[in-house]
Amino acid sequence: MAHSRDELEEMISRYEAASDRAGETGDWSPVGDFYTDDALYTWDNGGSWQFVARGPRQIVDWVLGTEMEGLEGWEYPYARKLIDDRQDMVVAFWRQIGPPDVTDPDGNRYEIPGTGGSWFHYAGDFKWDWQRDFFDHMNAGHTFLAMAKDGVLSDGMQRRMEKG
């Protein structure tokens, strides 16, 4: 069922605002309210591996919990949003910008080069029933290694890198 463009625009606007608040507060749990009970959230995790979370609980615990560990204070502003109201889809391209108080030796904020994105399917009732993220793992790794070299990598990200 196709929903109106206005409803899709309202959905992505609400979702973006909730994500921005979560990034500021560190509490990502309210973002789980934007997913259906059987929502699927995925991304490529290198080679033939896929990260998969199903349902709001796993999305909050794994995607917005475990996977956000060490990224406190990072910002993910949308650069562009494309809306397909015939297929109930939204593609949002985002940047990954480090915390304002963590800068490189030249005084610039760290940023993962390139653009990441999320591809959503809208189920109605202001909920997504699936989301697929895409981003460059190599660029992310390069940025985190630079931060480690500069001695400004967060404790949480240091722990994650030690595990990996």
Image: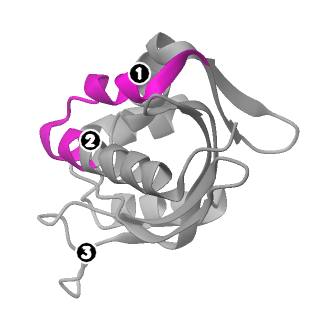
Sequence order check, earlier mark of 2 and 1: 2
Q: Which residue is mark 3?
A: 109
- Which residue is under mark 2? 18
Indicate left or right for 38 with 33 as reference.
right
Question: In the image, what residue type sits under mark 3?
Answer: Arg
Q: On the picture, is 109 further left or further right than 11?
A: left
Q: Of the residues under marks 1 and 3, which one precedes in the sequence?
A: 1
- Based on the picture, tell me whether residue 32 belongs to the magenta stretch: yes
Q: Which label lies toward us, 1 or 3?
A: 1
Q: Residues within 10 Å of mark 1 (few under 14, many from 20)?
A: many
Q: Residue at x 25, y 49 (%)?
A: 17
> Where is the N terminus found, in terms of image quarters?
top right
Circles 2 and 3: CB atoms closer than 8 Å: no
**Amino acid under disc 1:** Val
Can you name the residue that lies furthest to the bottom here? 106
What secondary structure do most residues of the magenta stretch adopt?
helix
Instruction: Identify the residue shown where x is 45% and y is 48%.
Output: 7
